Image (spheres, helix red, strand yellow):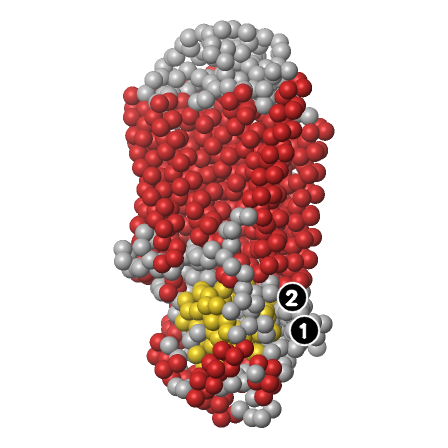
Amino acid sequence: MQIQDSAIDAQEALIQVAGHGEHGVHGDHGDHAHPDLRTMGLITFLLSESLMFGALFAVYFVMKGRLGQWPPEGTEVELLLPALNTSVLIASSFVIHKGEEAIKKDDVAGMQMWYLITAAMGIFFLGGQVYEYTHLSYGLGTNTFSNCFYLMTGFHGLHVLIGVCMILGVWWRSRQDGHYSSVKHTGIEMAEIYWHFVDVIWIIMFSLIYVLTKLP
Amino acid sequence: MNRTTSLVLVIIAGILGTIFSFWFGLNNHLLPEQASMQAPLVDDLFNVMVVIGTALFILTEGLIVYSMIRFRQPPGDETDGADIEGNLPLEIVWTAIPAVIVIGIGVYSVEVYEDMGGLHLASPPGHMHVQQPESPGTEMAGMDSAAMAAMPPGSAMAATMSADMAKAAPVIPLPEAKEQIASSYYGIGNRLSDEADEIDLTVNVTGMQFAWLFEYPDLGITVGELHLPVGRRVRLQMKAVDVIHSFWVPQFRLKQDVIPGEETRLQFVATLPGTYPVFCAELCGSYHGSMRTQTIVHSDEDYAEWVKTSQVAAKPSKVPMTVAQLSDEEYLAPYAQEIGLNAETLPKPSTRSF
Amino acid sequence: MTQTNPRVIAQPTPPPPEIEEVPSYRMWKWYDYFTFNVDHKLIGIQYIVMGFIFYLVGGAMAIAMRTELRTPDPDFVDPSLYNALLTNHGTVMIFLWVIPTTIGGFGNYFIPLMIGARDMAFPKLNALAFWLNPPAALLLAVSFIYGGAQAGWTSYPPLSEITAPQAQVLWVAALILIGTSSIMGSLNFLVTIWKMRVPSLPLLKMPLFCWSIIAAAVIALIGTPPLTIGLLLLTFDILFGTSFYKPDAGGTVVLYQHLFWFYSHPAVYLMVLPVFGVMSEVIPVYARKPIFGYTAIAYSSLAISFVGLFVWVHHMFTSGTAPWMRMFFTVSTLLVAIPTGVKIFSWVATLWQGKIRYTSAMLFAVGLLSMFVFGGITGVTLAAVPFDLHVHDSYYIVGHFHYVLFGGSVFGIYAGVYHWFPKMTGRFLDERLGKIHFVMTFFGTHLTFLPMHNLGLSGMPRRIAMYDPQFQALNQLCTWGAYLLALSIVPFYFNVIYSWIKGKRSSGNPWNALTLEWTTDSPPMIENWEVLPVVTTGPYDYGKDRQEEVRQTD
């Protein structure tokens, strides 16, 4: 092993050393430019996170398998409002994508608009869920179906909430001039990826809890 | 030391190691006496694994110790060792040989497991929501409701706690609560004859904190110790009323968890008269360690004697300290059974045993 | 900056290393170690020191339990407290000692150094991951106000739902915090190793420690989420009246066991794989030989983590497990023995024709090897269902996994500390104390854990505070062994504390090792190198007739 001193390396290193001597904090390193790492980290995280939902789905099937009638009498689900909710959430995935397209054209205002709309749709979804919770005749502890129902939709709702916060955070930051641009918008991208993830999970969950239970 | 000498030494060491492995494998006396039909099967498997394990152990540890001594740094020699990065044939060999060994052990294990009756359950596990099938010679109704009545104390507490949290919605009772409980039989079956269903004696075993309860549905006996006739096909139908327990008689080499809400079974033949301990092997609370009793394997005459005296003296005193923990229904269960006894159920095991 | 030549060929004595003081602005102050600092080396030290503190805590619990088990009767601690001790002994040793020390500690400290990075990919996330651990420990401590979680580290319902439920909830909260920390750390490692290697370091030239961390990180990322869900459902059952694990209301207790073991069996590999990595670093350096079968060892780590995902039911062989499952998981479990064997044999072959330097690190590494052979063989016996039915939940299991986790993981941590202490602190540990420490630990381990196999085979269940008097003699032997083990840490802790302050100064590369972490000063400066190193040789090219490297100094 050997350390080679190319002139460029040395220069970069010196700049860095000076910088760190003064501030003692880590910034981007001159040696390595890694603009994509945050996105990669997020995707790794979401792969892991998806297994959480995978486990919940497995639990759902086990619980379903233990009961002859699923959902048991008296704990049926409504379909109308959730279907509306679902379409809003799915539509929001397209809306948020418009936002990313906008920033790729350096259209910050457009991005802000699309992201705010997405956030509003997310909030609508959450509101719908709260409405649903308060108007059902059964609670969390009623039976194993209601256990699964509240826990799964609630857990997903938590993710929607986090997604809305991320989107609003992006919007808040974007108000600063030049924070995002067509070449520098990792935060926007991450919020979008996360939102798509939440969306895909919901589609599976909606099919399991609402659609399949309605089928004869 | 020239090449031939070392070769000879290696061969001698190999032969001695092999001999020792076989001797140790077959004479290890690590396991307690064999008192069930399954025990010799398990022990044979264990002994084979001990032979292989000892040989591998001697080989590997021998190589380690030899290398440690032979290849230690010569005093003052600061140079590096030989430049060997690998050896493909050697690596293939030490991947392939363990692979062959473990596959062999795997096949042998499956075979032993089948011989033990593991793959031939009298009532194979069905779908979980299927109603409990009727099995001959089981008068489980009394125990069933008793087991259900004995809710774990914690769930009552949890329910209270949840009352605040959950909404004040009317709690809708589960329509088919009964069917969910005790509908699958896991455990070890019995393959003495082709008719695996033929059972001489059925005992309902209940595990509870911190005692075992053995109920002989056909004899109207409920006791705290397990009495078995030697050489008879026995089925234990096991339930837990509170938490998970695990029924273990080391001399039988059999263990099966006793699980709340799911019946498990052990089927075996006790082969050696004597008194053996019964342990609970799954952590079940503070006094888990004291949840032990004994199983007494009788000769036919002794067993008949015991049945006679027990039936006469079927008194609560036969039931150990657990009485305090029993609900009324549970407490009464054996008597209900006794009243329910009829000519059909009674003679069946008796004729065989007497 | 002065670099010493990492390897000396045909040179009777290495040149006396020149030790230069690193300018103080390139080093952290002592109080920085108590702050939210994002430097990977500092975080590594934080993890290791935390780990060694909790090693004492978990060890104290073990000693209390062994003292209880001197006699068959419960006469030393209350049986409930005994159960709380065994639960928290397991929890602390796994989640606050072995995993944080190996992955969090060695991983954070050495992964960037080994791959030529200046830090981890996400330094802030890294610091956050560490700082989730102390609150978790605090929760465990607080749980003792409510009697402590008493259902074993496995915490099977219904027992865990009805025994000290408040403590159980705190225990769950602690585990979820640690699990989150583990996920954060793992994705950080994966991204770092994947993206931040120096350009001259291809994946298959990485030190094997990096490979083992990859394997461990994958396991953590796959296993932790289902465990979290399992624990979450447990909490909901306790607090909010759900009935996932309540059989009388439609739930099933076996479901928890699946969710738990889906993580917790791989967690065993989580504890062992990084230590395998440490072995692969330590053995070639002191045997002065290239590692035997680099590729095989690297891929066997991945094979272990992959196969390890499909073996979890072997913890449930006596539970409500269908016959086909018992068969399938017998075979899958047996398969793990193959890649593990590959590793063991490769290390033994690395010793062959080496010139072994018996430093304390090497002693512990060879000690690990001999222990692990035994633990591995007993592990194979346990995979066979018919035999496992007999010894499941008996002391045989306790003996087996302590050979693997104490004789394996803990020995590996010791080896790593003796090996890397000069790198981390710039000072040597005292070798004589190290050897005393080794001898005591080696014999203590056998004395404590070997008789447990006999106990289990002859019928003693595990997790019991009171036992059949026939087992007393062997139990007393175990207890004496445990006391010896407790004593064995005295020379070690003394050694570490003393040497950290006053030990002999070390050069950048005291062992003449070839991996990248030895190309910088000891301890490395903030940001690790003035100029990033360039990889010109493999990580284990000992004894090779390489071109004499010309090391330029600036």
Among the two numbered marks 2 and 1 on one chain, the one whose residue lies closer to the N terminus: 2
Q: Is residue C326 left or right of residue C60?
A: right
Q: Residue C79 sits in which quadrant?
A: bottom left
Q: Amino acid at mark 2?
A: Gly
Task: Residue A22: give x, y in percent of width and height.
Answer: 38, 22
- Element carrying mark 2: loop
Task: Residue C211: give x, y in percent of width and height.
Answer: 58, 34
- For residue A128, say whether it is visible: no
Residue beneath the point at 32% across and 30% down: C491
Residue beneath the point at 47% across and 71% down: B296
Q: Amino acid at mark 1?
A: Ala
Mark 1, Cα crowd under 10 Å, few <14 / some 14-19 / many 20+, is: some
Identify which residue, C366 or A94, lies in the foreground: C366
- The reply to whether the C-beta atoms of the residues labelled 2 and 1 are less than 8 Å apart is yes
Image quadrant occupied by the C terminus of chain B: bottom right
Residue beneath disc 1 = B196
Residue at mark 1: chain: B
Residue at mark 2: chain: B
Task: Residue C349: give x, y in percent of width and height.
Answer: 60, 27
Residue beneath disc 2 = B117
Q: Is residue C218 left or right of residue C520?
A: right
